[in-house]
Amino acid sequence: MVIPHQLRGSVRHFVNRSQEVARLSALVADDGTEPHASRVAVITGTAGVGKTSLALHWAHTIREHFTGGELYANLRGYAADPPTPPEVVLGRFLEDLGISAAQVPVTRERRETLFRSLTAHRRMLIFLDNAADSAQVRPLLPGTAQSLVLVTSRDDLTSLVAQQDAVRVRVATLPTPDAVALLRAATAEDRPDDQGSDLSELALMCGGLPLALRIAAERAAGWPTVPLGELIDELRDETARWSVLTADPEDEAEEGADAMRSVFEWSYQALPSGAARLFRLLGLHPGNEFGLPVVACLAGREPSRVRPLLEALVRAHLLQRRPGGRYEFHDLMKAYAGERVRREENKEERSAVLARCVAWYLHTADAAQRAIAPYDRWVLDDHVPAPTGTLAFEDYESAFQWYKAESANLVTCTRAAADAGFPGMAWRLAVVLRAIYMHHNAFDDWGTTAGIAVDAARASGEEAGQAEALENLGKVAFQALRLEEAEECHQAALAIRRRIGDRHSTAVSVNALGLIGLRRRRLDEAAAHFTEAVEIFQQLGDRRWTALMCSNLAETLCELGHGEQAAPLIEQALSDFRELGDHSGEGNALWLLSWARREAGDPDAAASAIADALTLAAEEDNQLWQGHWLAESARVELARGNPEAALGSFQESADVQQRLGDAAREAVALDGAGQACQGLGRVDEAAELHHRAIATFRDVDAHWRLANALAHLGDALDALGEDERAQAAWEEARRLVGAFDDPQATALARRVAARLNSSDGL
């Protein structure tokens, strides 16, 4: 079991807050009074008042109570970019709890369910920092009181308090004695002789805000020989200048903001010129967190020369150091840096800096896709020259770790490029990311960037780019089962590609339309599309794409019941995939070969093929493959007359699919398990399994699967002597199957009609 430990380090020189700590600690003492209700603590207060510092300080004192580990997420409720959606946070938490990225469920509901399942029997501390509102937090709550959720927000989160019985702790500005204590603790080593009256005045000028106090303390400690009174005079000048801009001098929040801004300005003005310029240029970075390589590119300097400047900003408390060689802005500081760069750098320079930054992300993402998904990558053209310092990756793991660290920035960078007038870079970045998103089921970020790319490509005037962006959006829609939208996108992309004469991309679009036909069970339509795509790729001499198209065509033939016709196509594709070293294609071909041999009446040959596929899944440690292929192995055992073995494989498949959060495939396995139970004479169990599968098939609008499961349920109910319920199940199956006109549907319709006729005759 993976046990994450994600708490950030506690702050130094933490002072008082004893009443707030006592209220929070009562939650730990109240362990399990309501075992089925989440324990939630909400720390609220204005910006810079020390909510996160209090939360971290307290969390470190109680972490030993939570043996299941700690999860942390910055929800970015008050950053310049939109708050992080809860489904994105859930996806990251699931990965942190041991679910591979490729196996994270697509829908938010399934992510919530899986998250609650994984945390149900763990004692975990879950820290949600900077929440925008209650709606952002609620999906992230575990289902039991074993875990504790700690939330910080500028919002009062009234709904969370009212509906989840969260304990709210309001954090006020520090009273003057505590503020002075913080200043004295932070400056004692460098300025032990400062007078209490001067410290009190400095504390008042900082508005009792810990963030401002820490920055002021660092400024004072950095000038130990300058009397504190002189430094206070400088700050007073800044305060007077900012007070002219105050909209409402009686507004306490506005006063706090002015105090904060004055301290920011005071500290900024004391920076060496190089550090000051880097600080304001960082205001152009699309995100709040970043690593040294992109900062060096943004600044146009060598990393060795940029690192000391970053450390100077950390010492001045204008940046925070994060693990993995990364740095982060407080959202207030990021806004201030943006303000400074707009004042001090002209528009042309700002544009050039942002363009370098976006180009760095574009080319580094291209290097990542080549390492992560070499067979599915999009070939980046030379429209955007690669800037100095672009990263390269030696292997999958290093590329994936970079992607994980930068995933939020990649989305904001795509949006920033489009908004700043770089549409060509925006759509290219989105399309480069497609292969990574596809391989790791990152549907949230994929959908966001794909939507941006369509508008950006249109703005760029590049027809090939418009087609790529439409294909990208079509693939997202297909994965989300928005099939009409997917078809519209792929048809539009196909029209462009035929017009400009891009035959390779034309075949890609034709294949996409074939997949939609296959999903809708328009099998003749799908077969026609795949046949056209095969012919084009054969003419182009593209061996891998030809093998993929042959596999898709073979799957369609299997759905039509033409296993013997499919087998030669699959065997050729299998040979090609093996020579190309494409394990995903190889495993898929083995699964198809098993299906084809089973349909053709040769279950022993089928068993050999699916055993090879499962061996490959085990070698690759790929649960997605294992769960899918176990169901085929079970069908083979049914065909061989081994319902006991089939039941075991179906149950194992269902367990894997449940862990992965794939409801539809779990239902397929449950329905199969019901068939195996019928073969064993365990009809009561069979009926229950079919009922469970039917409920899921209704939820996901899987009409063909639903028709089959209803027919199976009718058989089980008939065996139980429940004639009326059996007839109702068969009648619904007959209505559903009437929407399909392929041979397998015709056979099912005849079988159901025969059962109904037989039942009527009794």
Image (spheres, rainbow, N blue to C red):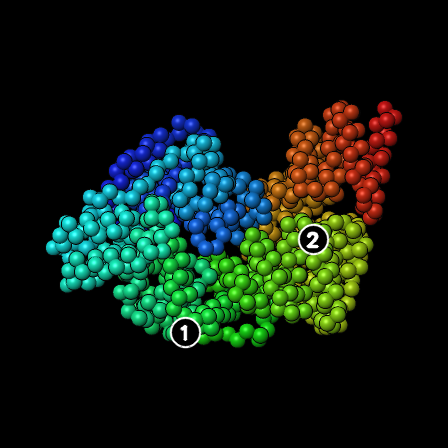
Residue 419 place in picture, x, y as percent: 54, 62
**Quadrant occupied by the N terminus:** top left
Residue drawn 19% across the image and 49% down it? 200
Q: How many marks?
A: 2
**Quadrant occupied by the C terminus:** top right
The label shown at residue 300 is: 1
Residue 529 place in picture, x, y as percent: 77, 60
Left or right of residue 522, residue 245 in this image: left
Left or right of residue 636, residue 181 in this image: left
Please identify the quarter of the rendering in which residue 262 is found. bottom left
Residue drawn 46% across the image and 61% down it? 286
Residue drawn 41% across the image and 36% down it? 40
The label shown at residue 686 is: none
Disc 1 residue type (three-letter): Gly
Please identify the quarter of the rendering in which residue 564 is found. bottom right
Q: Quick one: SS at disc 2?
A: helix
Give the distance between the C-alpha atoms of the residues marked 1 and 2, in whole angstroms. Answer: 43 Å
Residue 280 visible in this rendered orientation of the protein: yes
Disc 2 residue type (three-letter): Glu
Residue assigned mark 2: 485
Left or right of residue 581, residue 71 in this image: left
Residue 696 place in picture, x, y as percent: 65, 38
Q: Are marks 1 and 2 in contact (CB under 8 Å)?
A: no
